[in-house]
């Protein structure tokens, strides 16, 4: 898949189905993130119908059905209404910064189809290729405020796998004994001390901090001590 002029196209060059939602804000999106959701629906049409209904006051950029059918509801530079009250790393109101992908699934405990997951990965890869400013793929539950307001896409969604397959697995090593922290900053708790020379899998980068997996633990380390 590929993005051209803020529209999504299939590998055969055809545009994915496009149904413009009226539920957008003025201005242009400052694209930095992808936020993933589940739609709470048991079929692949009801959510799309609701997200394009002016009465709903909600919208999203894309919808992916369990069958892997993709529907686009706004150009990617338009500001859609999918996150609500939200904050992430100093930014608030993430509708202005995030492409939103709704995915057909009934609730946080529902299983995901492999077909659907592969399509999500394919779509996210196309978005990251088109918009290099995208640095993270986030769950709605991670960014919604107050904490606990949302639970999507839920614990059964393989977020780590999606991030790895979209961004690729980068392996680095520590140049000194290094504190692995619970968040990107020295004010976060130390989870573990990584000995010098420890190999770490890079999950994402935020400013001068890197989210890594090492020795079976996920956390954040300072970029300056990785090579």
Image (cartoon, rainbow, N blue to C red):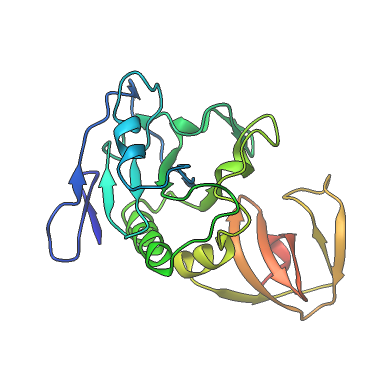
> Left or right: 59 with respect to 69?
right
> Measured along the vertical axis of the image, is residue 224 above or below residue 182?
below
Q: Quadrant of residue 129?
A: bottom left
Q: Is residue 212 toward the left or the right of residue 33 in the image?
A: right
Q: Residue at x 41, y 46 (%)?
A: 101
Name the residue furthest front.
42
Residue name at image x 34 percent, y 58 percent:
123
- For the N terminus, the quadrant is bottom left
Residue 74 coordinates in the image, percent (x, y): 27, 36
Q: Nearer the viewer, residue 111 or 78?
A: 111
Query: Quarter of the image holding residue 22?
Result: top left
Residue 222 versus residue 31 in the image, above or below: below
Q: How many marks?
A: 0
In front of the other: 212 or 110: 110
Where does the image place residue 205, in percent across and percent down from the top left?
59, 57
Residue at 54%, 73% in the rendered image = 169
Taking the spot 63% from the left edge, 56% from the top edge, the residue there is 155
Q: Please provide percent x and percent y for residue 141.
A: 61, 42
Image quadrant holding the C terminus, namely bottom right
Residue 159, image x, y percentages: 56, 60
């Amino acid at each position: 898949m590929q993005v051209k002029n803020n529209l999504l196209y299939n590998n055969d060059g055809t545009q994915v189905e496009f149904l413009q939602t009226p539920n957008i804000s003025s201005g242009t999106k400052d694209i930095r993130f992808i936020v993933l959701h589940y739609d709470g629906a048991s079929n692949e049409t009801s959510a799309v119908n609701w997200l394009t209904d002016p009465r709903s006051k909600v919208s999203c950029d894309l919808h992916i059905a369990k069958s892997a059918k993709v529907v686009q509801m706004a150009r990617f530079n338009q500001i859609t209404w999918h996150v609500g009250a939200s904050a992430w790393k100093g930014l608030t109101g993430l509708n202005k910064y995030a492409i939103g992908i709704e995915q057909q699934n009934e609730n946080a405990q529902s299983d995901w189809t492999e077909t659907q997951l592969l399509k999500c990965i394919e779509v996210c890869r196309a978005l990251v290729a088109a918009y290099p400013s995208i640095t993270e793929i986030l769950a709605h539950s991670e960014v919604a405020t107050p904490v606990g307001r949302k639970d999507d896409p839920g614990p059964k969604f393989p977020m780590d796998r999606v991030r790895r397959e979209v961004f690729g697995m980068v392996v680095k090593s520590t140049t000194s004994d290094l504190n692995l922290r619970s968040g990107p900053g020295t004010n976060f708790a130390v989870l573990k001390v990584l000995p010098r020379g420890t190999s770490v899998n890079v999950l994402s980068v935020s400013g001068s901090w890197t989210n890594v997996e090492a020795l079976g633990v996920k956390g954040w380390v300072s970029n300056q001590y990785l090579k």
